[in-house]
Image: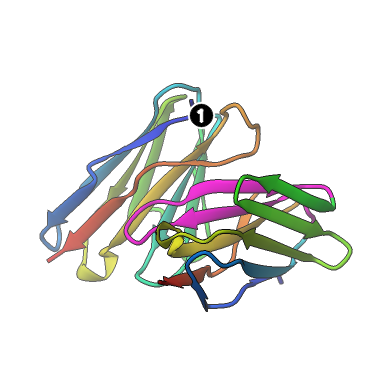
Amino acid sequence: GQNIDQPTEMTATEGAIVQINCTYQTSGFNGLFWYQQHAGEAPTFLSYNVLDGLEEKGRFSSFLSRSKGYSYLLLKELQMKDSASYLCAVMDSNYQLIWGAGTKLIIKP
Amino acid sequence: GAVVSQHPSWVICKSGTSVKIECRSLDFQATTMFWYRQFPKQSLMLMATSNEGSKATYEQGVEKDKFLINHASLTLSTLTVTSAHPEDSSFYICSATGGRELYEQYFGPGTRLTVT
């Protein structure tokens, strides 16, 4: 079966760095997405990785290792507004997104 | 660019009635549209995938006669929840592909449905 695993909840301090991990087992791989979702709102796109390595975009970076079925989202200089759920999703061989359950990130002052 | 709108943003209806939710791609032609449902504190659950001019493909466990999807044009898809029940209360989100990034899904703002 297809499976995406990520921690349910994480807590971090404002100004610090946090890494959210995602492991996956899917039938085929056409890329991995990270989305941010604030409570009561729709997800917004953060990053897309299809090749191994690190993609940096401002305070957010995303890493992918296809051989390990592993990705992480790194958030630097955390701000209170970063409190949200972070969803990992993998596009399978049918170009369908398989979603993880999301990681709720709580930022404390 | 790549903006998706949904209407209404929230709706309250009585049990047994039907509710229609619209999803529009405002500045691009959506080759494929997706309908998701999200219960509180849970992740997105794909309900169906639709391509313009063809029947929607429903995920296992989703009743196609209850959740009617029409994708009449490249910019509009509708989801009609028929004979709504309180357990249909949820956050319904549509997304679309066909924007600048080929496989990226652009999400609408979601529709909060409450069935009383």
> Residue at the location (74% across, 47% down)?
A55
* x 62%, y 73%: residue: A6
Q: Is residue A46 magenta?
A: yes
Residue B25 image position (x, y, % from top left)? 42, 29
Q: Position of residue B102 (x, y in %)?
A: 65, 32
**Seen in the image, is B60 located left or right of residue B76?**
right
Judge whether B78 appears above or below A108 on screen: above
Question: Is residue B116 at all visible to an observer of this figure?
Answer: yes
Q: Residue at x 24, y 45 (%)?
A: B9
Query: Can residue B18 be spotted in the picture?
Result: no
Quick one: label 1, few (<14), some, or many (20+) residues within 10 Å?
many
Q: Nearer the viewer, residue B34 or B42?
A: B42
Q: Quadrant of residue B105?
A: top right
Determine whether the residue tagged by mark 1 lies in a helix, strand or loop.
loop
Is A88 on the left-hand or right-hand side of B63?
Answer: right
Image quadrant holding the C terminus of chain B, namely bottom left
| Residue type (three-letter) at the residue carrying disc 1 | Ala
Q: Nearer the viewer, residue A94 or A108?
A: A108
Would you place residue A8 above or below residue A86 in this image?
A: below
- The residue indicated by pointer 1 is B30
Marks counted in the figure total 1
Q: Tell me residue A108's x, y (percent).
A: 42, 74
Q: Chain of mark 1?
A: B
Which residue is at the front of the view, A9 or A107? A107
Q: Residue at x 23, y 57 (%)?
A: B113
Range drawn in magenta? A28-51
Query: Residue B40 at what x, y percent from top left?
Result: 35, 70
Tell me which colouring the rendered structure shows.
rainbow
* Residue B69 on the magenta segment: no
